[in-house]
């Protein structure tokens, strides 16, 4: 029955069918998105059904609108509702920036080639490009670029002085910094300087959006690091699942539980490991992030298996 379900404190929760209908999505699409991208931390009913809050339903509606505009769900999935709303506002068009292509200067080893290969539809005009930050001074401000776009896969504090010099030399109205790995403190420092900071987009259509957002002065609250949810299972819960009887002829629940025990232990260990210098700290932060992401994937698999096989599951953590 696709009716909202009231739970404690009079909060209204919606089952998958109702949530999908309110968001304008086919329920099959919602299920695929949840399975592939873990779109939300939906609660579970006592029968294992997903329950969505009004806030989560609103976010699903924003995702639907942006996907209809041509954005890739894989890019959107990790963004908060506020970010999605900002993207939708920008996508609706700003008369100051939505007409002519945005003039950009590209800095980075691969981004210029990717943009050049995408011959049309980006709404970007590359005025100049170079492989390194120290090459911006030679290009100078004569290019007329509106946005300086810098691609630095491994971004750290050592790049900040070079970025400052490049921004001054380019004299662009806005700066977009793209990274694959970066410490949160470095991202905060760049944002405090007025840069728009984001992960290197898989879809170049997102690059156009970022450039227009930066030029319009809209600082999207891009996530500073990939969020890692707290552990779904503690060691006691994993031990209970491993020891529970199962209708399955294989031992997958036990093996998954043991893997999660190992991954969780390493995640905690990496957080406590001694750091001799800032490079050590960054390395252990990346190790902890990788372990946390692996744990979340395994927890999703174990939850699915436990629900299907009637194994004991602990209540959701707040």
Image: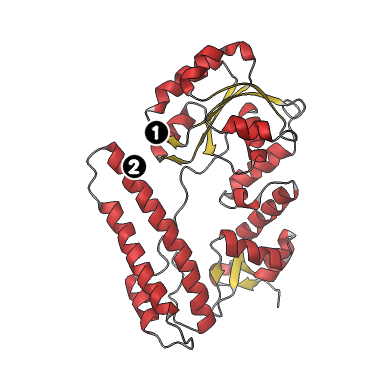
In the image, residue 294 lies at what x, y percent? 43, 60
Q: Which residue is denoted by mark 2 in the rendering?
A: 282
Tags 2 and 1 in contact by the CB under 8 Å rule?
yes
Q: What residue appears at the point 41 percent right and 26 percent down from the top-left corner?
A: 160
Left or right: residue 259 compared with residue 144: left
Does residue 197 appear in the picture of this structure?
A: yes
Question: In the picture, which quadrant includes the N terminus?
Answer: bottom right
Asked where in the image residue 201 lies, by quadrant, the reply is top right
Q: How is the image coloured?
A: secondary structure
Q: For the residues marked 2 and 1, what is the alpha-carbon distance in whole angstroms?
A: 9 Å
In the image, residue 44 lies at what x, y percent? 54, 72
Q: Which residue is denoted by mark 1 in the rendering?
A: 156
Q: What residue appears at the point 46 percent right and 17 percent down from the top-left corner?
A: 165
Judging depth in this view, the residue of 69 and 193 nearest the camera is: 69
Question: In the picture, which quadrant includes the C terminus?
Answer: bottom left
Left or right: residue 199 compared with residue 69: left
Does residue 213 appear in the picture of this structure?
A: no
Judging depth in this view, the residue of 103 and 90 nearest the camera is: 103
Judging depth in this view, the residue of 138 and 102 nearest the camera is: 138
In the image, residue 187 lies at what x, y percent? 45, 35
Counting labels gives 2
* SS label for mark 2: helix
> Reading the chain from its start, which is encountered first: label 2 or label 1?
1
In the image, residue 139 lies at what x, y percent? 56, 14
* SS label for mark 1: loop
Asked where in the image residue 11 lies, by quadrant, the reply is bottom right
Task: Establish if 272 lies above or below 188.
Answer: below
Q: Residues within 10 Å of mark 2 (few under 14, many from 20)?
A: some
């Amino acid at each position: 029955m696709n009716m909202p379900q009231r739970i404690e404190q009079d909060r209204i929760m919606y089952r998958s069918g109702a949530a999908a209908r309110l968001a304008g999505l086919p329920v099959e699409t919602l299920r695929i998105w949840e399975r592939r991208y873990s779109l939300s931390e939906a609660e579970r009913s006592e029968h294992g059904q997903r329950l969505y809050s009004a806030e989560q339903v609103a976010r699903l509606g924003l995702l639907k609108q942006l996907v209809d505009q041509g954005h890739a769900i894989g890019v959107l999935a990790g963004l908060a509702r506020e970010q999605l709303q900002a993207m939708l506002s920008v996508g609706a068009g700003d008369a100051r920036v939505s007409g002519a292509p945005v003039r950009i200067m590209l800095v980075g080893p691969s981004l210029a080639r990717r943009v050049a290969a995408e011959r049309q539809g980006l709404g970007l005009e590359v005025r100049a490009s170079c492989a390194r930050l120290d090459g911006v001074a030679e290009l100078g401000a004569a290019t007329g670029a509106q946005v300086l776009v810098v691609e630095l896969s491994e971004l750290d504090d050592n790049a900040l002085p070079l970025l400052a010099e490049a921004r001054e030399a380019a004299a662009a109205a806005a700066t977009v910094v793209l990274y694959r790995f970066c410490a949160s403190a470095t991202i905060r420092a760049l944002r405090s300087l007025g840069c728009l900071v984001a992960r290197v987009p898989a879809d170049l259509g997102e690059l156009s959006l970022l450039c227009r957002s930066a030029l319009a002065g809209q600082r999207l609250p891009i996530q500073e690091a990939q969020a890692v949810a707290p552990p779904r299972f503690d060691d006691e819960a994993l031990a209970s699942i491993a020891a529970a009887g199962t209708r399955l002829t294989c031992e997958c629940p036990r093996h998954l539980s043991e893997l999660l025990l190992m991954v969780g232990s390493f995640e905690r260990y990496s957080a406590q490991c001694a750091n001799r210098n800032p490079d050590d700290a960054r390395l252990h932060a990346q190790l902890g992030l990788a372990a946390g992401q692996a744990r979340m994937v395994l927890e999703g698999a174990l939850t699915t298996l436990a629900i299907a096989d009637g194994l004991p599951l602990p209540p959701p953590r707040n």
